[in-house]
Amino acid sequence: MNVFGERFKVMTFGESHGSAIGCVVDGVPAGLRVDENFINQEMDRRRGGKNRYSTPRSEADKIEILSGVFEGISTGMPIALLIRNTNVKTKDYESIQSVFRPGHADWTYMQKYGIRDYRGGGRSSARESAARVAGGAIAKLLLHELGIICESGIYAIGGIQAQNLDFEYAKKSEIFALDPNVEEKQKALIRAAKGDQDSIGGVALLQARRHKGRMVEGLGEPLYYKLDGVIGGMMMGLNGVKAVEIGDGIRASEVRGSQNNDAMDVKGFLSNHSGGILGGISNGENIVVKIYFKPTPSIFLPQKTINTKGENTLCELKGRHDPCIAIRGSVVCESLLALILADMVLLHTATRLENIKKIYN
């Protein structure tokens, strides 16, 4: 499936080495100011080629708005966003056009569709995630109207974890590190893996909060469109993600209920082990999510594999690849969280009769 959402819908299209990628965003209310500069700033955060910790592939990733916006304002019609691919190097992949790359989706896509698009992975490439960031930027503009902020950063690289979380610092860091005290150690691990022609995994941490006051309550649709369930499914649908935690996540399985429950008083919750979600619905606390990325499967060490004829061979890659996909992946996940919350906000507007009456009375 290539479409996400119930009310705020996003469909992405395109392949890694095709002429363009993009998305169509449907369900955006009319009257939203669509800031093209903001969208391009979001694209720039995800863009590679900026430093030695990301892929050398440097696409301009400039957005073209094709529809749904008139004089900078959304019309209520579908918004189509186009991103042209201008820096493709298909030649880098010609030597492996009949080889299944270990750790990639080459084998499974071939089994499902019977077609081998060897040009950087085609539709299964992380290049597609640029379209998700474009759609996420529209979602963020909607959320900004409600004072909702989505932010992200790198929590861990190769097991070196942040002890303190500083989302403002992460915005300035080359690797979006949340903790300046461990950033250099995290960078050293990435450089070492890259120097060995290898790669390394990492963990991104996401947070959704309100600019002022408590996070919006009541977001999430039980029983089959729960907020945490949708977050888990959406994040696991991103290339390279192998696990998702809400709040304390795995640690909750190691403690007692008396330690895990978030007690309350008249001022609100006294802790946030739940990560801002109870019963699949936001409870007003900050929404906190950890995303676990595997090491980049594209490495330059020779690896045993088979070819399309079923023969044993070696996979020896060329091309341009991130030594740690968690870095740019954190920006994509932040965009995905915005898409989810925008959808949940629109769903929530019709939950109560009193809300409907405010519109029609």
Image (cartoon, rainbow, N blue to C red):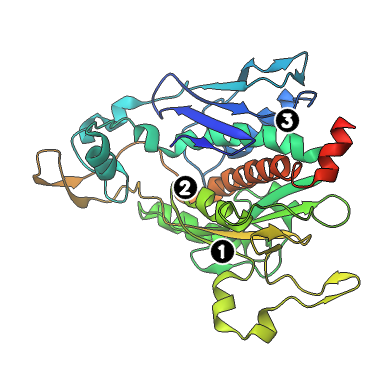
The quadrant of the picture occupied by the C terminus is top right
Q: Looking at this view, is 110 or 8 the one in front? A: 8
Mark 3 neighbour class, 10 Å CA radius: few under 14, some 14 to 19, many 20 or more: some
C-beta proximity under 8 Å, tags 1 and 3: no
Secondary structure at badge 2 equals loop
Secondary structure at badge 1 equals strand
Foreground: disc 1 or disc 3: 1
The quadrant of the picture occupied by the N terminus is top left
Mark 1 neighbour class, 10 Å CA radius: few under 14, some 14 to 19, many 20 or more: some
Mark 2, residue position: 237
Mark 1, residue position: 245
Foreground: disc 2 or disc 3: 2
Q: What residue is rendered at 55% in x and 82% in y?
A: 254
Kindly identify the amino acid type of the residue bearing the numbered disc 1.
Glu
Q: Which numbered dot is residue 38? A: 3
Q: Distance of mark 2 from mark 3, alpha carbons?
A: 25 Å
Q: Is residue 49 visible?
A: no
